[in-house]
Amino acid sequence: MERLICTVTNDLTYDQRMIRICSSLSRAGYEVWLVGRELPASKPLRKQAFQQYRLRCRFQSGKLFYLEYNLRLLYWLYRQQFDALCAVDLDTLLPAFWWCRLRKKPLVYDAHEYFTETPEVVRRPLVQKVWESVAELCIPRLQYAYTVGEILAEQFAERYGTPFAVIRNLPVRREETAPVSKPQPPVILYQGALNEGRGLETAIAAMQQIDNAQLWLAGEGDLSEKLWQQAKALDLEEKVRFLGYLPPHELQELTPQASIGLNLLENKGLSYYYSLANKTFDYLQAGVPAIHMDFPEYTQLHKQHPAFLLLEELSAETLAGQLRRLLEDQVLYDQLRYACRAAADELNWEREEEKLLAFWKEVLPLPPR
């Protein structure tokens, strides 16, 4: 059996995207390992169709973490036998690049985001320069790479001269079930990391202008404490709920309960500007009308599937205005919900999985069964 190893820097528990990808590759006949890191608060791993391993690090963030993790990953890969590696994002690429070159094995680069253009990197020029050096060293020498959106693939190809396939981060198709009972008051849901550049401060501020609705934040991140303090200072503790990290199966049950989904990115770097976030498709699949920024990928998707609203300006006033439209205009809301159901038939992992397996068949053909 062909053995491939996928590398990430998260703790694996909440990585819906890699769980989907590794499960699909495992079902196809590959021996798959997903390698991440163990955090102090990490929960025991759920059993999956593939193997999982977590590296322990002394440092948990910053430059020392990335240095330590890459060194530990470099050593761990030295002790492994593999037929191919898949480096997920730039922060795991260098060790995988080294061992694949040394052992003459295929390497796949999975660019989940434009790493050198994330807000956390863009505002630190020296850090950005270091990661750009890693990208310039490795990416032009790669034969196999893919990313999550057409526009991002074009940007990478133009910058590094390496062609990128597109495998979107789509959810598994939901079976048709009885209508979900919506909580009252209506829920406005954000799911994802509570990090810089996600428009979360604006979302909380907008709740001052929204009556008879609650904002639920499903996730954790660098801004968790700051956002909690903001909600408290604005006397919004009854309107804003912090749900923390939720395992994928719990999040899938929660999302359909929402009346509105949020995906509010700030233009603080090309990574967000050219993004196509997985929550976009999670909302569609759950039949939840959402509000997205009027950035290129979302604008293009809206032309094909007008199942959500676009926000041209990220401010509390404009966001509150769009929220009120969805909460008060039942005709508009029903139109968007119908469009969500139509989009769900097309935008699901069962279809996108075919692209993934065709891609890997070129990288690492499986022997006949």
Image: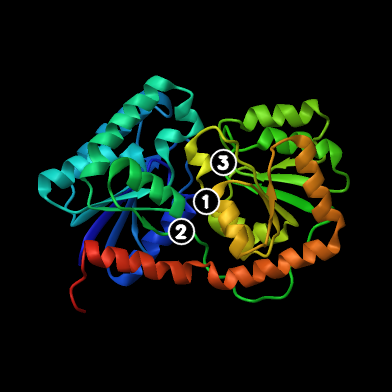
Residue 343 vs residue 118: left or right? right
Residue 96 vs residue 102: left or right? right
Camera-near label (1 vs 3) is 1
**Relative to 333, is 298 above or below?**
above
Q: Is residue 149 visible?
A: no
Residue 139, how many percent across, how many down?
27, 42
Q: Residue furthest bottom?
A: 369
Number of residues whose C-alpha sits closer than 10 Å to that of mark 3, classed few (under 14), some (14–19) or many (20 or more): some
Q: Which residue is mark 2?
A: 168
**Relative to 253, is 178 above or below?**
below
Q: What secondary structure is found at the residue carrying circle 2?
A: loop
Residue 268, how many percent across, how many down?
54, 32
Report the amino acid beneath label 3: Ala
Q: Which residue is mark 1?
A: 276
The residue at the point 74 percent across, 50 percent down is: 188
Residue 105 numbered tag: none
The CA distance from mark 1 to mark 3 is 15 Å
Among numbered discs 1 and 2, the one appearing first in the sequence: 2
Residue 193 numbered tag: 3
Residue 69, how many percent across, how many down?
32, 33
Q: Is residue 69 visible?
A: yes
Residue 358, how many percent across, how many down?
31, 68
The residue at the point 62 percent across, 64 percent down is: 305
Question: In the depicted view, which residue is nearer to us: 253 or 18?
Answer: 18
Query: Looking at the image, do the residues carrying marks 1 and 3 touch, with CB atoms under 8 Å apart?
Result: no
Report the amino acid beneath label 2: Arg
Residue 227 vs residue 205: left or right? left
Q: Quadrant of the N terminus?
A: bottom left
Query: Looking at the image, do the residues carrying marks 1 and 2 touch, with CB atoms under 8 Å apart?
Result: yes
Question: In the depicted view, which residue is nearer to us: 302 or 181?
Answer: 302
The residue at the point 11 percent across, 50 percent down is: 104
Query: Looking at the image, do the residues carrying marks 3 and 2 touch, with CB atoms under 8 Å apart?
Result: no
